[in-house]
Amino acid sequence: MAQIVNILIVDDHHFIIQGYTNAIIRFPNKKYEFTITRAADCKEAYEKIMNQDGLVFDLALLDISMPAYTDKNLESGEDIAKLLNQHSPDCKIVLLTMHSERLKAEKIIEEINPLGLIIKNDLTYDIMLMLLATVLKGQIYYSDSVIKFLNMQQKEKVYVDVFDKQILHFLNKGIKADDVALYVSLSSSSVKKRIELMKILLDKKGIKNDELVRIANENGMMIK
C-alpha cells in the first residue's frame, strides 16, 4: 500500500504552484501517494494549516517572499514554516526564493532548519524530482547556489550537494571511485571530477580517497 504524503504548497504565483504540482504527480516512486493543498499568500496558508480538521502536513514547499497576513504577524514563508513546526512538527520544510542576494541562509538554517533550501533559478524538473526524493527520505537538499553561498560565508562546516554525499557514502563503504558510477546517476568522469573538486574545496588537493572520506565526515559532509 502506498504511503500517503500530505503536501502544502504556498506561493503567490499560480504558474509556479502548477509547476510544482506537475512534478509531484509525475514523481516516479509509486511508494508514495500525494495529496496537495495549495495557498497563494500567508493568510490562505494560515487558514489551510489551522482549518484542516486534524490534517497534518508531511511536506511543505514554501516561497519565502509572499503577501503577509499582518493580523497574525505572518510576514513570509519563514513565518509559515514556524507555524507548521508548531502544528505539524514532523512536516518536512522546503523553503524557496528567487532572491539569492537577499538570502539569509545561516539565519534560516539556525531558526528553521529546513530540509530543503532552494534558489528558484536552480530549479529544473529533474532537480525538483531529486529534491522530492531526497527530502522524503529525511535528508537535506540545498540547491547549488545555496551551497556556494554557504561555503563562501562559513568556514567551520563544508556544504556539498546530494550527489557528492552519495559519492562519499559509497566511497565510505569501500566502493572504488571507478565503480561509484554504478550506484549513482552520474558518469564515471563526473564522479571523479566531483571527488577532485571536494578535495579542492577542503584545501586537501592530492589526498587519497579514504582520507577524503575521513575529513568529509569531520566536516559534516556525509549522509546522516
Image (cartoon, grey):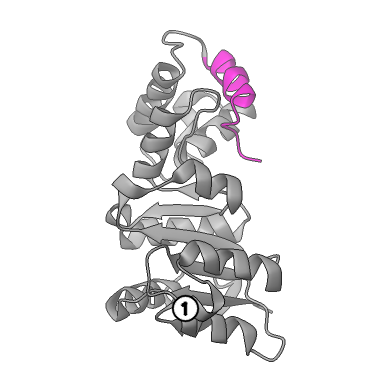
Residue 78 visible, this angle: yes
Residue 173 highlighted magenta (yes or no): no
Depth order, front residue of 183/214: 214
Q: Left or right: 41 with respect to 85? A: left
Q: Nearer the viewer, residue 139 or 53?
A: 53
Whether residue 150 is situated above or below residue 40 in the rendered picture: above
Quarter the C terminus occupies: top right
Q: Is residue 213 magenta?
A: yes
| Quadrant of the rendering where the N terminus is positioned | bottom right
Residue 162 visible at all:
no
Residue flagged by tag 1: what amino acid is it? Tyr
Residue behind mark 1: 69
Quarter of the image where one finds residue 201: top left
205 with respect to 132 (left or right): left
Using the rendered view, name the quadrant where residue 194 is placed. Answer: top left
Mark 1 burial class by Cα count in 10 Å: few <14, some 14-19, many 20+: some
Name the chief secondary structure element in magenta. helix
Q: Residue at x 36, y 77 (%)?
A: 17
Q: Residue furthest front?
A: 71
The residue located at (47%, 28%) in the rendering is 154
Q: Position of residue 130 (x, y in %)?
A: 45, 56
* Image quadrant assignment for residue 215: top right
Q: Position of residue 48 (x, y in %)?
A: 56, 85
> Residue 65: percent from the left, percent from the top?
37, 65
- Residue at 62 percent across and 19 percent down: it is 214
Please give the range of residues in magenta: 209-224
